[in-house]
Image (spheres, grey):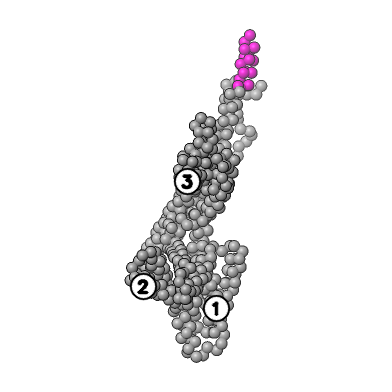
Amino acid sequence: MVSTQCYSSISLWNTPPKPSLTLCQNVSLFLYREFAREREKVENRQEFLKLRRQQQLEKELNGFVEWICKAEEIILAEDRTTEEERMYIMEARKKAAAKRKKLKNLGKSKSSETDDEEATTESGDEGILKKEKKPAKSGFWRAEKRFRYCIRHTVKTQWFYWFVIVLVFLNTICVAVEHYGQPNWLALFLYYAEFVFLGLFMCEMLIKIYALGPRIYFESAFNRFDCIVIAGSIFEVVWSAYKEGSFGISVLRALRLLRIFKVTKYWSSLRNLVISLLSSMRSIISLLFLLFLFILIFALLGMQLFGGQFILPEGTPPTNFNTFTIALLTVFQILTGEDWNEVMYLGINSQGGHESGMIYSLYFIILTLFGNYTLLNVFLAIAVDNLANAQELTAAEEQQQERDKEKQQMELEKEMEALQKAKDGTPTTEDAEAEKEKEKESKKEEKKEEEPEEEAPEGPKPMLPYSCMFIFSSTNP
């Protein structure tokens, strides 16, 4: 009896019940999900670190290139520089510009604006190179070259950049102030202000073309846009002199305010936010495509359910499902939450009222829940994620700046100590540190010599006198 009871208990122990299997499956699923989340976090962290490393490399490279270009400009402006050295610098700049063009065509460059700026700094002397090939013995060409260097330096300064931005802002205000029924003095002022701003913008364009050269100037997308807008404004002024009315091309000058995004070079937090937003453009575009498919499917479904049935005594309402385009606009209105309940009640009434048409309210409820509260909130999630990445980048940059400052202070303190000890004749801190390291190494060697060598174990290790699971004995039978 005892043996049968033991056997039955062991068999029950060895065959676990079915609920334990389901519990193990649930635990494994939970762990799988947690590990997947952690892996996703690690991957996002790796992408963030990669972006940060790339940003640091680009920053260091840009600083190094600017430093080299400034040094080359100083060398070219000096009188003692020979023609051979100038030709060598010009050829090197031409080769660098050609390589950068190849990278730009392959899509490996950073952005159109930064590429254009680097192209101007690297190969801005193309026009002067042709003149220097000639025997420039006269003082006129030397004076013209120095004058051009001076203007190029002025064009690249911050005060010139902000002066142009202020002009664009004032021009935008003048365009916005114009209204119907304005007094004569305001109309006359705005009429002459248009000529003043047009003349200033033309002068800016001509100065840049002279300083940078036509080819380098028109490589920039912003510069090409400026030239098109100014040419259109001139055509508009000439046209209005002969016929009344205008084409409104001068309003496009307000788009030049987009140049203010170049401030991100000096505003680290805004630069990091723009970088994180640009890095998430792929996910935003995918989400927009998914949202468009969602709107398309529900617009077609709404045409099948409510097409031609939104008929009221006073006429057809503007929000209906009679045509495809109006159905798309109606679904988009429901997603934004604008009077979606009114559209729902129209749909219920079109299907027989509250008695037989309440089932059709599920269409609008599902559309609102999944569209408004799910898909549209994903944009907010992406924005929050980008803000977190931007804050991490900003904090990392601040920590790096603090570390650099501490290193500079430490180096200055070491130099001051070295100078003082050199004057006093005492050994420097470097010599003291070298002596300390030698003493530590000698102490380590002495300890190694004093430690006895461990005897090699003979034979197998003895088994511990313990049993396994309180059933088996410590020795093999």
Percent x, y of residue 314? 47, 43
Per the rendering, the mark at residue 126 is 1
Q: Does the image show residue 406?
A: yes
Mark 2 lies on a secondary structure that is helix
Outermost residue toward the right in this view: 477
Say whether residue 333 is left or right of residue 24.
Answer: left
- The residue singled out by tag 2 in the image is 188
In the displayed structure, would residue 248 be above or below residue 282? below
Q: Which residue is mark 3?
A: 336
User: Of callouts 1 and 2, which one flags the residue occurring earlier in the amino acid sequence?
Assistant: 1
Image location (x, y in percent) of residue 188: 36, 72
Residue at the spot x=57%, y=37% of the render? 32
- Which residue is more in the foreground, 452 or 51? 51
Of the pair 73 and 1, the residue shown nearer to us = 73
Residue found at x 51% / y 90%:
137
Where is the C terminus found, in terms of image quarters?
A: top right
The amino acid sitting under disc 1 is Glu
Instruction: Decide: is 241 above or below 438.
Output: below
> Which is more N-terminal, label 3 or label 1?
1
Please tell me whether mark 1 sits on a helix, a strand or a loop.
Answer: helix
The image shows residue 441 at horizontal and vertical percentages of 48, 54
Q: Which residues are magenta?
A: 1-17
